[in-house]
Image (cartoon, rainbow, N blue to C red):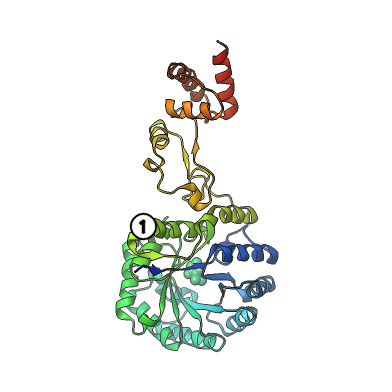
Amino acid sequence: MSKKVFIFDTTLRDGEQVPGCKLNTKEKLVLALRLEELGVDILEAGFPVSSPGDFESVNQIAKALKNTVVCGLTRAVQKDIEVAAEALKPAKRFRIHTGIGTSDLHIKYKFNSNKEEIIERAVKAVAMARNFTDDVEFYAEDAGRTDNEYLARVIEAVIKAGATTLNIPDTTGYCLPYQYQAKMEYLVNNVKGIENAILSCHCHNDLGLATANSIAGVMGGARQIECTINGLGERAGNTALEEVVMILNQHKDLGYYTHINPTLLNPISREVSDVMRMQVQPNKAIVGANAFSHSSGIHQDGFLKEAQTYEIINPAEVGAEDSKIVLTARSGRSALAFRLHKLGYEFTRNDIDALYGIFTEVADKMKEVKEADLKIMADNFSKK
Ligand code: KIV
Ligand code: ZN
């Protein structure tokens, strides 16, 4: 039987930390409602103690959402936890996400502390959060570079203190997929009480591995992925929600499913891009402008014969516009004939052969042959 993977969206927290992506309360609220419609299970609405504006945003979102668990981030600090609980109070269901750095680097340089003291602080924070809700998630920041034995001790201690979800962030995007998978497996096999808790992936994209690591984490035993629309997040970004959802959708053989409605992926991607004023790179998987464009002759010919030769996803499945046949100097005769036919021209095979010669000369001088150029070419040819 397929197993559910919970989608924890952090577009409004990790995504909003990106310089230039800051949102006001109204903008956050609109996106939160869209994310609920999309089907995310948990929505991290912000970091309430960070500013009065973020407190207000989390509070408004907590009031507005009907089914989604609303989550607020905190450090392992009493004031943060109290303020988050206050902001989240109106929610039907809420989660406090608290945690602390566990790698040697974090312990030494950020906290000037030691391993035992970090465990004490983690346990204290989780116990404190449990006074406000029984849905407490603990993050072991920089878990990607934390040795597995110590990480297991931390996780076991916070589960005992009441944490129900354990976030294992690869904060710096350092891990390779097999290492991240092995980390999850180690925790599954070595932490008492883990069978009653949920392990969560939170992977950054510094080496372009965020998506691969999240999937590897699930294969290692995690049942939650933390991710953002368009992969927004600190530095090189976070795991792209649209990518992990479609990977699990495409590879049903892996045996996992999510509750995301994929037809809303492209519309929400555009909305996030517009409101955060962050363009999506054209070659971005699932939601990029070129994700369903075909421009080389070999691909176009195959695609026009049978779309599945060069497309593993039907664009309608992810709410994207129809596939495009783009004309460039690398395009072939079938693509030229297809585009001319779409414009209403009916040429014979011989005409297309002749037109193709003219087309390649024009195309060599341009990045792309647009509709207007094509019409001029076809009209001039017809007059001959
Ligand atoms: O990347 C990270 O470690 C985080 C935590 C605060 C969860 O964003
Ligand atoms: Zn993060």
Q: Nearer the viewer, residue 375 or 290?
A: 375
| Residue at screen point 49% across, 47% down | 315
Q: Quadrant of the N terminus?
A: bottom left
Where is residue 373 drawn, in percent x and y?
58, 24
Q: Nearer the viewer, residue 369 or 166?
A: 369
In the rendered image, the vertical position of residue 135 relative to residue 168, given as above or below: below
Q: Nearer the viewer, residue 353 or 276?
A: 353
Quarter of the image for residue 250 reads: bottom left
Quarter of the image for residue 248 reads: bottom left
In the rendered image, the vertical position of residue 65 relative to residue 334, given as above or below: below
Q: Quadrant of the C terminus?
A: top right
Q: Is residue 332 visible to the viewer in this orientation of the structure?
A: no
Q: Name the kind of residue labelled 1 in the image.
A: His
Neighbours of disc 1 within 10 Å: few (<14), some (14-19), many (20+): few
In the rendered image, the vertical position of residue 343 relative to residue 352, given as above or below: below
| Residue at screen point 37% across, 41% down | 309
Left or right of 133 in this view: 87: right
Quick one: which residue is furthest to the top in this view? 384
Left or right of 150 in this view: 141: right
Where is residue 217 drawn, in percent x and y?
37, 67
Left or right of 325 in this view: 52: right
Residue identifier under label 1: 251
Where is residue 284 drawn, in percent x and y?
48, 49
| Residue at screen point 66% across, 75% down | 63
Q: Nearer the viewer, residue 319 or 359?
A: 319
Where is residue 276 drawn, in percent x and y?
62, 56
Task: Say which element carries label 1.
Answer: loop
Q: Is residue 267 visible to the viewer in this orientation of the structure?
A: yes
| Residue at screen point 37% across, 77% down | 151
